[in-house]
Image (tube, rainbow, N blue to C red):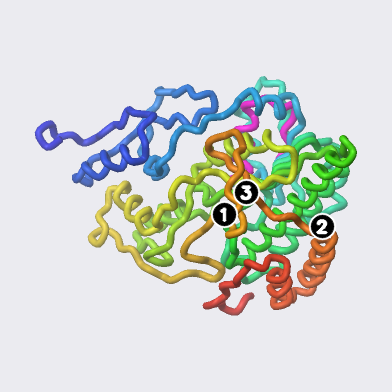
Amino acid sequence: MKKEQINTVIIAIPTASGKQIRRIVNNIKNKEVKIKTLPGLYKLVNGKVSVSRIRNIKIEDLLSREPVDLNLEEISGYLKDKRVLVTGGGGSIGGGLARQICQFKPKSLILLDNSENGLFHINLELEGKWVGVEMEIVPVVADIRNRDKMNKIFKKYRPEVVFHSAAHKHVPMMEYHPDEAVMNNIIGTKNVVELAERHGVESFVLISTDKAINPTSVMGASKRVAEMMVKGLGSRKVEAKERTGESKNKTRFVAVRFGNVLESNGSVVPMFKQQIADGGPVTVTNIEVKRYFMTLPEASQLVIQAGAMGIGGEVFVLDMGKPVKVLDLAKQIIRLSGLKLGEDIEIKIIGLRPGEKLFEELLTEEERSGALGDSGHKKIFVAKVGEVDREKLEKDIKELERLAKEMDTEGIIRKLQEIVPSYQPNRGMMKESI
């Protein structure tokens, strides 16, 4: 490189592993050298790589990932020519799902969100990309907490498949507003789940999170309750079928649990990039903090694949690879930005925020002792989730709703601890909420 005065390196190996790319990047000592790479195979659902453009290297290239292997025939069977509803369709994860779903040519794609801005942009993007294709894309501005309106939407658009992505996901923010976490993540989910059953939806997929496992946050606990709802309804269908040979409940309810999505709103990577653009410092909560990361296309494709599996009540866990040290991630982003740590930009350790913990988990102790069930896909597993007392859960959710409407923060925390015994609140360093 010195002899030839190289100023740009192109990594033309679309199947290169994270380890291989890291080795190449770490051996390029000159910060003036630009590093670019071809698109990764996992980006394209049909496995074909387009080499029409070379892009700047992205931090997700440094994650150790194999291309996602999808069962296209299985997926097409439940999405092609179907009416598909994505709640939270204007968000990063909902939008990622929408992009992937379109490739399977549903009859209609209903994108529902209470944010008109996010909805406008994803609708504009998809309509431009799929112009001339016989597929109706319908943006719907609505709030999942408004049960009456949601009922009318189900009645009007008659979705056959529902991906429930709408949720409040920002951990510290929900520590300050636990009533909103309850009303959106629990009551809103209850509305969508019950309406899906009432209107005969074929498949319902809840987007869950690793933060639901041994939660230390209100957000995580609220998503664990959402999982319990799906488990209870899905198990009821299975029980009825085993007892009578058939079930009145037509809907297959499943949940999919995964970690942080690199490109999602509020994710640490966009925040790091913005901090670098602003001149720093780059802030990391703790030198030991680790997180599981996935790319948006990877997560979206595996969620869609999981939706084709199971008979109901399963909680699927995506293979997230190894957790990544956030401090190392920050250093890599600084390096890839062409800057030198300590000279051009600093890293500042600021301490864990309310609701956060050092390490995320994908399984509870109970689930881990029960081992993982085989889903038939090498990157998707079935968590052995305990049975749910549906009557008690129904009463508990009604009580949570009452407490949320009264904005009784302490009451909400106590009730969530009762429903989710593994919930250990980390509400230290809380500032007074506005």
- Give whichever of discs 2 and 3 has the lower sequence position: 3
Residue visible at 73% across and 76% down in the picture: 411
- Give whichever of discs 1 and 3 has the lower sequence position: 1
Give the Cα distance between marks 2 and 3: 19 Å
Residue 390: which disc? Answer: 2
- Give whichever of discs 1 and 2 has the lower sequence position: 1
Mark 1 and mark 3 in contact? Answer it, CB < 8 Å.
no
Give the Cα distance between marks 1 and 2: 23 Å
Q: Look at mark 1 in the image and give the residue it sits on.
A: 368
Q: Identify the amino acid type marked 1.
A: Arg
Quarter of the image containing the C terminus? bottom right
Residue 383: which disc? Answer: 3
| 220 relative position to 336: left or right | right
Mark 2 and mark 3 in contact? Answer it, CB < 8 Å.
no
Residue visible at 32% across and 35% down in the picture: 36
Can you say whether 421 is above or below 196 in the image? Answer: below
Label 3: element kind: strand
Q: Indicate the position of residue 204 as horizontal and vertical percent values.
A: 74, 41
